[in-house]
Image (tube, rainbow, N blue to C red):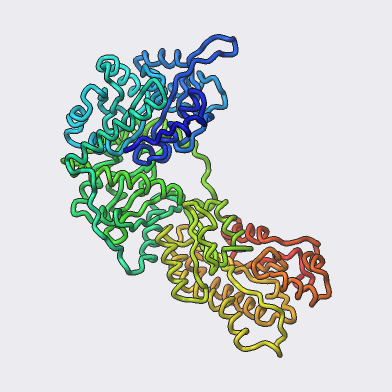
Amino acid sequence: MNSLWNDKEAAQFPGDLGLRVYTSRLLGRDPSLVLHGGGNTSVKITEKNILGEDETLLYVKGSGWDLEHIEAAGFSPVRIDHLLKLAKLRTLSDPQMVNELRTHMTRAAAPTPSVEAILHAILPFQYVDHTHADAVIAITNTAHGLARIREIYGDNVVVIPYVMPGFDLARRCAEHFAAEAKKNTIGMVLLNHGIFSFGRSAQESYERMIDLVTWAENYLAKYKAWTIPIPAEKPVAQPLRQELACLRRELSATAGFPVILAMHEDAASLAFARRADVATISQLGPATPDHVIRTKRLPMIGRDVPAYVAAYKKYFNEHAPRAREPKTMLDPAPRVILDPDFGVATVGRSAKDAAIAYDLYVHTMEIIQRATALGGYQALPAKDIFDVEYWDLEQAKLKGGGKPAVFSGEVALVTGAASGIGKASVDSLLARGAAVVGLDINPSITGLYNRPDYLGLVGDVTDEQQLTAALEKTARAFGGLDMLILNAGIFPPGCRIDALTTAEWQKVLHINLDSNFMLMREAHPLLKLAPQGGRVVVIGSKNVPAPGPGAVAYSASKAALNQLARVAALEWGADNIRINSLHPNAVFDTGIWTDEVLAARAKHYGLTVEQYKKNNVLKTEVTSRDVAELAAEMCGPLFAKTTAAQVPVDGGNERVI
């Protein structure tokens, strides 16, 4: 591990707090040190208060901030004199501690201070850094972890036996540090938890952290436990989309709400899932209590969800004292599934949650394998895991987490998603919490968004194999399919019947009708397994109820698509799939309305382009977003009892009315 300190960069962060921000970001850049909000840092600064008196404050990382992107506003200023007094108490409940931290800040708008603020306060150094370094945890999580840590560091660190984060940990650290710290002590190791470094300057504290972790890495390398052999594993080639959708449905039923199931079939994941001892080593517990809080659940082997749930309930009954029963019980669905066919699958209420679970488990896999190579992985006892999982502060987060988004845990596929109504539909669905797959022939679809809940796929909707492949990728990315927005289509230049070629006629019907038929047919098995019922929204056209001259191929294709939707509503109602249609008109910010087509249609009706845009009863312009918002609502609870509806989005068309 190398120091990332750069004098030129550091100069851009003036002052003690500025340098605290800089070195915190340096730590945050390395996921083997901190990941997804893990770790915390602090600096002690003397400032004048409103009365002009000198007052020493502990600026400690606040809740909700991650080190990689933290700013000065992410540090909470707490009066250190009060923290030192708290450290001398014999007992202090965690809710009381949080209250004391919040009521002794000097900035009311600051985030809630880290629960380890008292621990930072008692360490007699201006700068303190804390990480969950993978290399250190791999060593502590072995049968002889304490002896190995002492072998590596000697008096350079104070070693603290595991204590759950909070007041008790701070008090224990204060006692041990006062009794055991030497002149050469530059850090502190918390077994099964992480490592602290400290110093007189931001650079000294940061680089001591780098040195301490490097010693651990070198120790693992010395005993051939650093490099993890990864064979050239290959994922199973056969389609898994229906099996994954079945598994996701069962997981959702177990959790009590829809979940995302994300597959990861990279070589490292497959190699771990295919280890001969994986059924043993993966069930020994999480690498740190921090991972318990974020993943909420241990992994499972294979796809037997009922067996996992039965085992979890047995575990809960054995470890839950009666006094804890009124508290919020976490759902029993696993968060990590190991399977030799697809490697690692992670589960979350959202795609972001599933992605975080995977990021954390990548490091857990590395820690487990290194500890195993070092002599055997050994995690916290089950009671300690339970205590952290049902911690007062964790329960408070669960109760105060707010209402999930309407489509949280659900998956949507939108065709023709690179522009116009399709892109607007992607936006509307993402805003409602769905994981969205955008399909389009335009290569720009892949770069539309860079976020865990979006997947852009290049594909030709008229190619049956490409449609099947898109559904397979959708299931592997998110676990199944709940909503299908059929938007892709073309609107050719005006042409009367007597001048229309057979080739042009067939092209329009193939794109506007046949492709949607094929996609609906192939998507049906997945929609049938949607945890809350499948939904299809067909983007039709005003030309269905009110066709116009010069658009016979378009009108006929949309009318036939409308009939396809009506028949599907009749046939699929028993499968709890609802299908509704929108009939927009004159939506001019879409890909099919080129300037040429727009001018031609306006001329056909004897209107200017501006008159043509608002040629409706309400004299208003209809946008892609208008259509997309209604399409998203049709997938939501307001339309839960509606199927086969046909709703105009046209500002009021006299011929339709």
Q: Residue at x 57, y 51 (%)?
A: 431
Q: Which residue is drawn at 51% across and 72% down?
A: 460
Looking at the picture, does residue 361 appear above or below residue 630?
above
Can see residue 483? Answer: no
Relative to 217, 408 lies left or right: right
Relative to 103, 302 lies left or right: left
Most extreme residue toward the bottom is: 498
Q: In which quarter of the image is the N terminus?
A: top left
Please state the total of marks drawn on the protein image. 0
Residue 50, x across and y down, in percent: 60, 13
Q: Nearer the viewer, residue 17 or 2?
A: 2
Can see residue 160? Answer: yes
Relative to 245, 485 lies left or right: right
Q: In which quarter of the image is the C terminus?
A: bottom right
Q: Quadrant of residue 472?
A: bottom left
Most extreme residue toward the front is: 8
Residue 172, x across and y down, in percent: 30, 20
Residue 392, x across and y down, in percent: 40, 30
Looking at the picture, does residue 351 appear above or below residue 59?
below
Looking at the picture, does residue 7 appear above or below residue 653?
above
Q: Quadrant of residue 292?
A: top left
Q: Nearer the viewer, residue 278 or 76?
A: 76
Residue 258, x across and y down, in percent: 45, 53
Q: Nearer the viewer, residue 64 or 134?
A: 134
Q: Which residue is drawn at 64% across and 71% down?
A: 540
